[in-house]
Image (spheres, grey):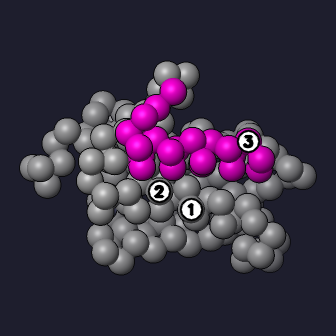
Amino acid sequence: MSDLTDLYQQVILDHNRRPRNRGVLPTANRVAHGDNPTCGDQCSVYLRLEGERIAEISFEGQGCAISQASASLMTTQIKGKTAAEASSLSENFHHIVTTGQAPEEISDLAAFAGVHAYPARIKCATLGWHAAMEALREKAETLKS
Ligand code: ZN
């Protein structure tokens, strides 16, 4: 892990130490699971969609610090947003981790800009976001309420 020191900026460390919105969400009406076998990361995203808005969201998972911190940050970024807004944020995040270029106004997401130098880690960083986007899509598994 020593070659990844550069990646562990403050935001990532903080989310890794104190994950936000972690655990099963009993009131969820959407759930999706993401798997990154090359690193061993797993992430389940639970969310409650009310109309177009993500009223509640949580994640559960295990894996490397990048994957878990990214999932934690993702929940804080898209909670309360509409599905369209969340999708736009997801695209921004994907752009940041693949190019290393981040618009200044999305500072927390920019903590992951260093990931672009480690292509194998991009899937770690995007795992939670992919699961969230899948949960938002209509074909995602729907929990019985
Ligand atoms: Zn990983």
Could you tell me which residue is drawn at 86 percent across and 50 percent down? 52
Residue 35 screen position, x and y as percent: 45, 74
Check disc 2 and report the residue beneath it.
126
120 is higher (above) or lower (below) than 78: below
Could you tell me which residue is drawn at 9 percent across and 49 percent down? 2
Q: Which residues are magenta?
A: 83-103
Queried on whether the Cβ of the residue with tag 3 lies below 8 angstroms from ligand 1, the answer reads no
Q: In terms of secondary structure, where does tag 3 sit?
A: helix
Judge the density around disc 1: few (<14), some (14-19), many (≥20) Cα neighbours within 10 Å.
many
Residue 25 screen position, x and y as percent: 64, 60
Query: Is residue 104 shown in magenta?
Result: no
Query: Is residue 84 shown in magenta?
Result: yes
| Quadrant housing the C terminus | bottom right
Q: Would you say the residues marked 1 and 2 are in contact, meaning their CB atoms lie under 8 Å apart? A: yes
Q: CA distance from mark 3 to mark 1?
A: 15 Å
Q: Which disc is residue 130 wearing?
A: 1
Q: Which disc is residue 85 wearing?
A: 3
